[in-house]
Image (spheres, grey):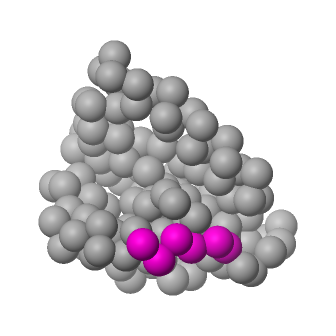
Amino acid sequence: MTFLPRNKKERPHSTQLRNEPTPAETRLWYGFLRTASPRWNRQRIIDSYIVDFFCLKAKLVVELDGSQHYDENGLVEYDRIRTEYLEALELKVLRFTNLEIENNFDGVCRKIQLEVERRVDAI
């Protein structure tokens, strides 16, 4: 599948997120994904969701979760539903915590690269 649904009403929000990244997003983008191959996008709209990072060629989504994703305010359930929807579009979702970016940056980058290679070879 090469076509992914995109709700264009989300564009202002995705632009804002791209212009105001978290420290973890900034580190992963400038420290790895910006120059990684194949090409990556930041704050990509997929239907009504905005994913942190997306590689079309590998059909791979990378999400960075701050502590708010583990609070009792419903984000855990929202993330589960969102992941199930993205996987129904034949996308793989990798989730990392901000602490993993901070404490194990090289390991996170290796895991992403291995998944990209595995998925690109399988396609």
* In the rendered image, the vertical position of residue 77 relative to residue 19, given as above or below: above
- Residue positioned 58% across, 64% down in the render: 47
The answer to whether residue 81 is seen in the rendering is yes
In this rendering, position of residue 121 left or right of residue 52? right
The answer to whether residue 100 is seen in the rendering is no
* In the rendered image, the vertical position of residue 94 relative to residue 122, given as above or below: above
- Among the 4 quarters of the image, the one containing residue 27: bottom left
* In the rendered image, the vertical position of residue 60 relative to residue 24, given as above or below: below
What span is colored magenta in the figure? 4-9
In this rendering, position of residue 77 left or right of residue 16? right
Furthest toward the front, the residue is: 9
**Residue 3: percent from the left, percent from the top?**
72, 79
- Residue positioned 29% across, 47% down in the render: 101
Instruction: Confirm whether the magenta stretch covers residue 66.
Output: no
**Residue 106: percent from the left, percent from the top?**
36, 53
The residue closer to the viewer here, 22 or 116, is 22
The residue closer to the viewer here, 106 or 116, is 116
- Residue positioned 62% across, 76% down in the render: 56
Furthest toward the top, the residue is: 72
* In the rendered image, the vertical position of residue 77 relative to residue 84, given as above or below: above
**Residue 113: percent from the left, percent from the top?**
54, 63
**Residue 120: percent from the left, percent from the top?**
73, 72
- Residue positioned 69% across, 58% down in the render: 91
